[in-house]
Image: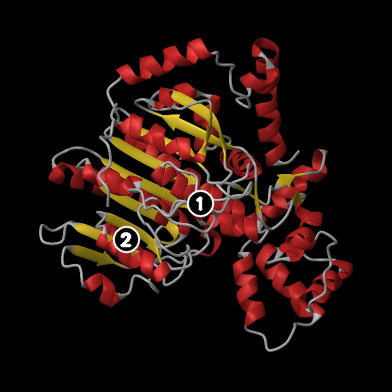
């Protein structure tokens, strides 16, 4: 019996008892209790009578399908014998620092059943559904005040933490209003700096240039993990930008020692913002923390990187939960902006467990494979393709599988589902023969998604909500006064 099977059998024994004693899906934490209008109204009234949250830690695993959450939990249980931090607070709410509430969220945008990150984060940021590709711009051409600016107006410290470029869609939706599309990252970066958040940590040096950052005299800059760890705010430069990559930060699997992990950035951000809040008068802080490369791994159908980056996000959840332990002023919201590619472990018995163990042996991301292929003057030989895949994944492909990839690299569609031929989808499909983890597509999906809220006024979270209603929940939980126009 494998380590994974032993871990799973231990969990299943608990689950069977729970199913018999308390009703299967509810006991396993896989469904929400029925809520009548009367009980919901009473819950809202009780939650509103609680003091508002001073601090909000809003955590986003970008592009996280439910299968991603489950696969990462399997991997953590195999490695540690315990659940992931996110699943643990769902399964055992008493392990959380405060009461836990859950919801299901509809991710549709104003013009698409399948949203993109720009429309999703903007809906959270301004409280209105918008078109895909838009940042802070309503369908009728207005620029409402984004939630980070609104929080600043209430005297709170603010921050954005991400593993993508800081000017990317999800961070941008909380702070920016862009007259064009999300692709104007240069303009978004300039506007972010103009709006003066207290903390920026992530990638994107191509837009957050040395010259652009130097123009802000009160902004300190760090560029490595060691510099971040050593940073101490100075009165003349109380704000901080940590720019750790020219483009996106590396996938967790490829992360160099000079780049901090998402958990390290989270730990730093919470300490920094609490200190900054005290300097600003003690009103608290609002920070968005994004595991942005989960989405990029899903687009590539890169199951190994998907797991590693989701686990890195879960470790950041752990940092947030540890920060909130023993205090009653901090609300944590954990969610995703949409599903992506809908991965799942899809074989029975020992074949599924053994395949999953192979997946955990991966050494390099598909981005690394992509870079090797891009550096070649012509399509690689079948032998070279096979050796690249094996170097990255520790999986030796069969000759028929290598032949499929050779034809795809020469421009042939090898999957009758056309979307599956995009990005690096065929590599993921071939590897699924070995890992037993397969993907639906290389695109976002229209799934309803999980929301978990922990802390003061978490009970105001509706059991079912759309993206724009999340904004109202945040405003109510923090008891923000009406936003001033920008």
Residues packed near mark 1 inside 10 Å, few (<14), some (14 to 19) or many (20 plus): many
Residue 381 point in image, percent of width and height: 79, 82
**Residue matched to label 2:** 192
Residue 215 point in image, percent of width and height: 21, 72
The residue at the far front in this view is 140
Residue at figure coordinates x 69%, y 58% from the top left: 442
* Closer to the camera in the image, 147 or 357: 147
Q: Earlier in the sequence, mark 2 or mark 1?
A: 1
* Closer to the camera in the image, 104 or 137: 137
Alpha carbon separation for disc pair 2 and 1? 18 Å
Q: Is residue 195 above or below residue 281?
A: below
Residues packed near mark 2 inside 10 Å, few (<14), some (14 to 19) or many (20 plus): many
Q: Tag on residue 119?
A: 1
Q: Is residue 484 above or below residue 54?
A: below
The quarter of the picture where residue 141 lies is bottom left
Q: Tag on residue 451?
A: none
Q: Is residue 12 above or below residue 35?
A: below
Determine if residue 34 is in view. yes
In the shown orientation, is residue 458 left or right of residue 389? Answer: left
The quarter of the picture where residue 68 lies is top right
Residue 223 point in image, percent of width and height: 32, 68
Residue at figure coordinates x 60%, y 44% from the top left: 72
Determine if residue 271 is in view. no
The quarter of the picture where residue 403 lies is bottom right
* Closer to the camera in the image, 459 or 178: 178
Q: Secondary structure at mark 1?
A: helix
Residue at figure coordinates x 39%, y 45% from the top left: 126
In the shown orientation, is residue 219 left or right of residue 394? Answer: left
On-image quarter of the N terminus: top right
Query: Number of marks in the image?
Result: 2
């Amino acid at each position: 019996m494998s380590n994974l099977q032993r871990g799973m059998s231990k969990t299943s024994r608990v689950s069977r008892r729970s199913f018999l004693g308390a009703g299967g899906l509810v006991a396993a934490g896989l469904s929400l209790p029925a809520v009548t209008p009367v009980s919901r109204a009473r819950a809202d009234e009780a939650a509103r009578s609680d003091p508002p949250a001073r601090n909000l830690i809003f955590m986003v695993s970008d592009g996280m399908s439910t299968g991603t959450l489950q696969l990462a939990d399997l991997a953590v249980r195999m490695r540690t014998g315990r659940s992931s931090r996110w699943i643990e607070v769902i399964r055992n709410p008493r392990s959380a620092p405060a009461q836990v509430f859950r919801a299901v969220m509809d991710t549709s945008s104003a013009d698409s059943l399948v949203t993109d990150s720009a429309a999703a984060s903007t809906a959270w940021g301004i409280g209105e559904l918008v078109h895909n590709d838009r940042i802070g711009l309503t369908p009728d051409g207005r620029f409402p005040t984004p939630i980070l600016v609104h929080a600043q107006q209430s005297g709170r410290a603010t921050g954005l933490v991400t593993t993508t470029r800081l000017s990317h869609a999800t961070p941008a939706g909380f702070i920016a209003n862009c007259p064009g599309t999300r692709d104007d990252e240069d303009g978004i970066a300039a506007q972010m700096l103009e709006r003066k958040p207290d903390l920026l940590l992530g990638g994107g040096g191509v837009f957050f240039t040395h010259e652009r950052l130097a123009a802000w005299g009160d902004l300190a800059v760090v560029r490595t993990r060691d510099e971040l760890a050593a940073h101490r705010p100075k009165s003349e430069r109380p704000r901080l930008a940590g720019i750790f990559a020219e483009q996106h930060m590396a996938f967790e699997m490829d992360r160099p020692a000079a780049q901090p992990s998402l958990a390290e950035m989270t730990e730093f951000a919470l300490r920094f913002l609490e200190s900054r809040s005290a300097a600003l008068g003690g009103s608290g802080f609002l920070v968005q923390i994004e595991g942005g490369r989960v989405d990029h791994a899903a687009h590539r159908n890169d199951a190994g990187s998907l797991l590693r980056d989701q686990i890195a996000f879960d470790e950041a959840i752990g940092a947030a939960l540890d920060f909130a332990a023993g205090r009653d002023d901090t609300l944590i919201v954990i969610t995703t902006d949409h599903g992506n590619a809908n991965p799942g472990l899809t074989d029975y018995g020992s074949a599924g467990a053994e395949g999953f163990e192979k997946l955990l042996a991966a050494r390099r991301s598909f981005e690394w494979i992509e870079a090797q292929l891009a550096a070649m003057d012509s399509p690689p030989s079948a032998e070279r393709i096979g050796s690249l895949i094996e170097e990255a994944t520790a999986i030796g492909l069969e000759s028929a599988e290598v032949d499929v990839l050779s034809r795809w690299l020469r421009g042939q569609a090898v999957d009758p589902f056309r979307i599956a031929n995009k990005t690096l989808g065929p590599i993921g499909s071939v590897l699924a023969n070995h890992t037993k983890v397969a993907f639906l597509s290389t695109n976002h999906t229209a799934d309803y998604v999980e929301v978990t809220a922990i802390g003061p006024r978490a009970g105001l979270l509706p059991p079912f909500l759309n993206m724009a209603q999340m904004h109202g929940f945040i405003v109510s939980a923090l008891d923000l006064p009406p936003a001033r126009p920008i």
